[in-house]
Image (cartoon, rainbow, N blue to C red):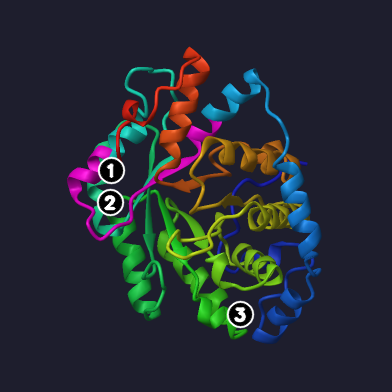
Amino acid sequence: MTMPTTAPAPGSTASAPGLADVTASDSTLRLFLHGLPGVDAVGLEARAAALGTRSIKTTAKAYALDLAISMVDLTTLEGADTPGKVRALGAKAVRPDPADRATPSTAAVCVYPDMVPAAKEAVAGSGVKVASVATAFPAGRASLAVKLADVREAVAAGADEVDMVIDRGAFLAGRYLKVYEEITAVKEACGTDARLKVIFETGELSTYDNIRRASWLGMLAGADFIKTSTGKVAVNATPANTLLMLEAVRDFRAATGVQVGVKPAGGIRTAKDAVKFLVLVNETAGADWLDNHWFRFGASSLLNDLLMQRQKLATGRYSGPDYVTVD
């Protein structure tokens, strides 16, 4: 049977066997989410650590480095961002290593909504996407009307992807239906052209059980991607929380036939770490997710280390940071 390869439309859980009534009310949604298997924290962390020890040989490492580069959402989300900085970042995303045209482009450039036009101009004619954070990123403390206006502005400016933050306060208070309805409203505001990444801010969810529940909640609401973090808090992407989310998308596809992507973001800075995450993907969700349509790294500094390691593999010499552009 051929699996569908897009996320469900808002409110489409009726098409998923066994999930037709899950989102009918706050009580049914709570019952479902709290009925998910509990997470064995010790086992989860031990498996993530064990997979991180896998050795990658030279040929496989070259492939892994290029794959990781192609999965980067090259990101700038600072108050001091300017159109010039965004255009420079876009140029780097399109051609990360001007001296080596065989270097793949990154997956996307991720910016604030008001910087989308500059990003679109910079990547025009390439396959690089423009992603925009929205919904009062990073805190999400705004009314739904404001959040939807934020999304519509980004999409109208040409964003190919929208990265939204959930209302963590509502989630932690157990108001799951409110979070679900907000995600479905944002999904609808994205229209048919922009893919939706739902950010949980895993460092604020306190427990692995909550991360599992948030993952299923986001997928039920129509997320195209589930994303760990904003990169703006102390604890962001970790091997353990990413492994847990990879298990969730694997199990969701088994239950519904719908494939959803995963994006760890924040704190992934070295090529060595990126390769460890690719091992997690392959060993947990499987090879179907080893593609930038289904797996991304949210990062700003990671690309430089990937480029330096790629140069070292090709030349036998470690060039150092002066041989890559400063973002």
Callouts 1 and 3 close, C-beta under 8 Å: no
Q: Residues within 10 Å of mark 1 (few under 14, many from 20)?
A: many
Q: Residues within 10 Å of mark 2 (few under 14, many from 20)?
A: many
* Residue drawn at point x = 38 percent, y = 67 percent: 137
Asked if residue 74 lies in the magenta stretch, the reply is yes
- Examine the rendered structure and indicate whether residue 273 appears above or below residue 184: above
* SS of the residue under disc 3: helix
* Of pointers 2 and 3, the one earlier in the residue sequence: 2
* Of pointers 1 and 3, the one earlier in the residue sequence: 1
* SS of the residue under disc 2: helix
Q: Nearer the viewer, residue 250 or 39?
A: 39
* Residue drawn at point x = 76 percent, y = 45 percent: 50
Asked if residue 158 lies in the magenta stretch, the reply is no
State which region is magenta: 67-88
Find residue 274 and report its horizontal and vertical position in percent.
57, 40
Q: For mark 3, what is the residue?
A: 176
Residue 120: which numbered mark, if any? 1
Q: Amino acid at mark 3?
A: Tyr
Q: Is residue 316 left or right of residue 213?
A: left
Q: CA distance from mark 1 to mark 2?
A: 6 Å
